[in-house]
Amino acid sequence: MTALAGWSRRDMADRVAADIPEGWAVNLGIGLPTLIANFVPIEREVMFHSENGILGVGPLPPAGQENPWLINAGKQPITLRPGAAIVGQADSFAIIRGGHLDLCVLGGYQVGANGDLANWSTGRAGEAPAVGGAMDLGAGAKRVWVLMEHAARDGTPRLVERCTYPLTALGTVSRVYTDIAVIDVTPDGFVLREAAPGISIEQIAARMGAPLSPIRD
Amino acid sequence: MTALAGWSRRDMADRVAADIPEGWAVNLGIGLPTLIANFVPIEREVMFHSENGILGVGPLPPAGQENPWLINAGKQPITLRPGAAIVGQADSFAIIRGGHLDLCVLGGYQVGANGDLANWSTGRAGEAPAVGGAMDLGAGAKRVWVLMEHAARDGTPRLVERCTYPLTALGTVSRVYTDIAVIDVTPDGFVLREAAPGISIEQIAARMGAPLSPIRD
Amino acid sequence: MIDKFVPSIEAALDGIGDGATIMVGGFGAVGQPHLLVDALGERGLRHLTIIANNAGGDFGGLPKLIAQGAITKVICSYPRATSKTAFDTLYAEGRIDLELVPQGTLAERIRAAGAGVPAFFTPTAAGTELAAGKEVRTIDGRACVLEYALSADFALIEAWEADRWGNLTYNAAGRNFNPIMATAAGVTIALAHHRRDLGTLAPETIVTPGLFVQRVFIAGGSA
Amino acid sequence: MIDKFVPSIEAALDGIGDGATIMVGGFGAVGQPHLLVDALGERGLRHLTIIANNAGGDFGGLPKLIAQGAITKVICSYPRATSKTAFDTLYAEGRIDLELVPQGTLAERIRAAGAGVPAFFTPTAAGTELAAGKEVRTIDGRACVLEYALSADFALIEAWEADRWGNLTYNAAGRNFNPIMATAAGVTIALAHHRRDLGTLAPETIVTPGLFVQRVFIAGGSA
C-alpha cells in the first residue's frame, strides 16, 4: 500500500487544536499530542493539565530560561500561564479519574471500531511494560481522542475491528486524528469526519482494518 | 448507691492532661474532653486536632478577640498556635481514619469490658440521632480514651460487661477516666490504674457493671 | 476568555429546581455560603435533598428551607442543635428523611465522587447501627463497611478568594467541606469574598483549581 | 519541644535495613530526594521493595541501587527510560520483580493507605491485563477493579520548606507524590531545602502537616 502525502505531524497537531474550544480542561499525552498546545492560540484559554499535578500549562520556556522545578508528564520543561494551579498526584488523578477533564488526547497503537484503545504495551516478552497515566486517562476523561499515524510503517492498519495489542481502556475513544483523516468512533463504528486534502474515502478505507462509513450530513 | 466525692470535672480533665506526653497528635471530643487542653502547659507541645481540619489548636481566645473563622469541632472560638496547619475535611478525616492521631479522648455513655464504646445515641425513638466524627475517631485513632462520669445520676453503671446503647466503635477503648478512677481496658477486662484520693477499689467496683481487677504491679 | 464570575445571586443559582440534590459547604456556621442558601429559600423549591454536615442545625438559611417544607431528605453527620429546630419537629413527625453518615465517611464519600472512586471499604461504623444493611468484608483482620460515592447536582460553597478561572482559596476553618464538595457536583457555585485578577493567586496556594468551579459570585457584588 | 530536624543524612536514614519497603517521592527527577536516595545506595542493603512512580528510570540514585542488586521488587507506573537501564537488564533476566500499576491507581492506593481506606473500586484498568486476577464488580453500569491500599515502612520525600514540627511545603511540580507518600509510611523522612522557624509558615499554605513527618533533613545542613 503506497504511503499517502496527507497531513504532516505539525498539521495533525494543528488539526486537533482547531477542535478544542475555549474553556476546556485538556490533558495531552506524551509525544505527538504534546505538540497540540503549540497550535492553540494563547488568547483562546484552554486549561492544559499535566499528570504531575499542573493545571494551566503554558508555552514552552525560551532556551536558557527553563525552571528545573517545572516539567510536564513527558519530563520536558514547561511554563505556567496566569491562572495555573498546582496540586499533588492524588488530586491530579482525581481530576482525571473523576471525569473533570473535558478531553484527553492520547497516542495510540490501535483503536477498535468499538472504541477500545491499545497504546501502552506491544506485549513483547522480556521488555518491561510501562503504563503511566494512560489507563486512568482512557477510563476517566469525558472525551478521549487519539492522535496517531493512520497505519503502521509496513502498512498494517491501526484502526481495526478489535484491538490485538493489550488494551488500555475499553470503549472509550470517540475520535481519531491521523495523517490522512479525522474519524469519529460511533455506536455504528468508524465514520469519516474529514479527509486530508487530496485524499479520498476509498484511500482512507483501504488503509483500515474495519469498515468506514462516509461523512454524515 | 451514695455518690462519692471524687475528682471534679476540672480535676478529671487535669488528670487526663497529665498522661499526654509532648509530641502527640491528639483529638479532644466535644464537651468535657475539650477542657483537657486547658491543663496541658503550653510549653509541653501537643498537637491538638479538631475535626474541621485544624492541627495545632491553641488556647481559648481572650473575650472580644475571637476570630469568627476559627472554631473547633464544638463550634467554640479557638486560636491557632505556632506550627498550626489547616486542611480540608477529607484530609482531616484521613488523619483520623488513617491512624495518625496518637490519641483521641471522647465522652461516653457506656464502655464495655471488651473495649466497646457507646457514645452517640441513646436509641430513643423520634429523636434525630447525630454522630459527627465519633465513629471515625473510635475506629481510627491509635488510642481511644474515654472521659466520663463513673456512673449515671441514678447510679446505673456506665462501665459494663457489654454496652446496651447503640455502639460507636468495637473493642477500641483502652482507658477510661472517671470522677473516681482511672481504669485500663485490657484483654482481661477492666483493671484499676488509679483511684481518686480517698476512694477504695471496693467503692469503685461497686459502681460498675463488670468485674474490676486490682492495680497491677 | 474564561470568566466564571456571575453578576447576581440569581444568576449564580440559575437552574436549581425542584427535586435537586444540593451540597452545602460549611462546618457549623463557618464556611457556609449563607447568601446563597438564604436566596435559595426565596425560590419556593420542593423535594430537595440537602447534603451538608450540619443540615438541621440552627444557623444559616437551611432551617428556613426546612421549615418551608422544601427539603425531603438530609444527608449529614450532625443534625442536632443546642435548641429544638424545625428539623427536629419534622423528623419527629416523619416528614423528613435523614441519612445519618459518620462525618469521615461523609467526607470520604464526597471526595470519592469527585475522584472517580465509585465505592470504598472503611472500618468506620463496622458493627454499629449505621452499618445496618451494608456489605461488610474483613480486610487485614478488620471488619470494613462498603460505602458508595456521594455526588450532587449542585454544590453551594464558600471561598475566600477567587479569580475568573474559578480558582479558589479558603480562609482558616472556612475550608472544611468546601473543596471536596466543589469536586462532587455537576454545577459548583462559589460565594467568594475577594475577587482576584487572574495570575495573582500563587499556583501552589490555590486549594480548588478552577476546573471544578462553574460559577463564582463575589459577596458584596463585583468588589 | 518537638524538633524533627536531624543533623545528618545518616540520622535521617537510621533504621532502614534489609527487606524494607521504601517509598521514594518524585515524578521524573523533580521532587525526588536525591541526597537521601544516593546515601541509601552506600549502605549495602538487600531485598528492598521500592515504590516510586519512575522506579527503573535513568535518573537519581535508584539506578545505582538497582545495579547493586539491592532491590528485589519495584512497584511503579513507568519503569521505562529513554535509554536502556540497569532495571531493563535485570528485568529481562528475571532478577527483579515489577508490579506495574496505573499511575492514578498508584496514587490512590498510596493515598488510601494514609487515609485508612483499606480497599476501593476503580474503573481504571478494568478489562485490561493489569486487572488480571483482580476482583471486578459492576457499579453504576461500569466494570470496576478492587484495589488495595499501599503502604511502606519508610517514605523518602522532598520538600521545599520545613519547620521543626515537620510541617512542609513543596515547590512547583516538586509536589507530585510527596504529600501522599508522607501519609502512607511508618517513618516519613523529608529532605527539605529551607528551614523555617515555627509559626512562620502560613497555616493555610502548609501542604503536609507535621504529624505525618518523623524526620527532616535540611539540604546543605542546618541552613
Image: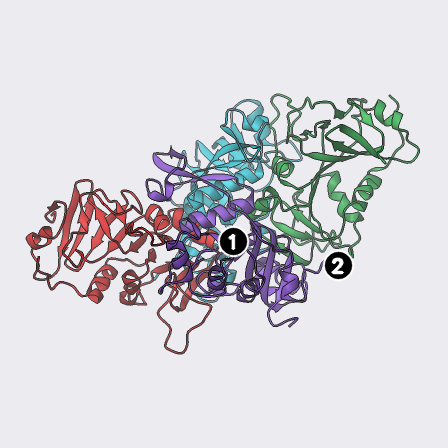
Chain colours: A red, B green, C cyan, D purple
Q: Nearer the viewer, residue B132 or B104?
A: B104
Q: Nearer the viewer, residue C66 or A97?
A: A97
Q: Amino acid at mark 1?
A: Ala
Residue C199, horizontal then vertical, whole percent: 44, 66
Q: CA distance from mark 2 to mark 1?
A: 35 Å
Q: Which residue is mark 2?
A: D1
Q: Is residue D108 visible?
A: yes
Q: Nearer the viewer, residue C20 or C211?
A: C211
Residue C159 marker = 1
Does residue C86 lie above or below B54 as drawn?
Answer: above
Question: In the rendered image, which quarter contains the N terminus of chain D?
Answer: bottom right
Mark 2 neighbour density, 10 Å: few (under 14) some (14–19) many (20 or more): few
Q: Is residue D140 left or right of residue B127?
A: left
Which chain contains the residue that carries disc 1?
C
Q: Residue at x 21, y 65 (%)?
A: A9
Question: In the rendered image, which quarter contains the C terminus of chain D?
Answer: bottom right
Does residue C35 lie above or below A9 as drawn?
Answer: above
Q: Is residue B3 visible?
A: no
Residue D44, horizontal then vertical, whole percent: 57, 60
Q: Amino acid at mark 2?
A: Met
Name the outermost residue toward the bottom. A64
Q: Residue at x 43, y 35 (%)?
A: C45
Quarter holding residue C142: top right
Mark 1 neighbour density, 10 Å: few (under 14) some (14–19) many (20 or more): many
Q: Callout 1: helix, strand or loop?
A: strand
Does residue B126 lie above or below A55 as drawn?
Answer: above
Q: Nearer the viewer, residue A38 or C85?
A: A38
Residue D204, horizontal then vertical, whole percent: 58, 58
Marks 2,1: beta carbons within 8 A: no
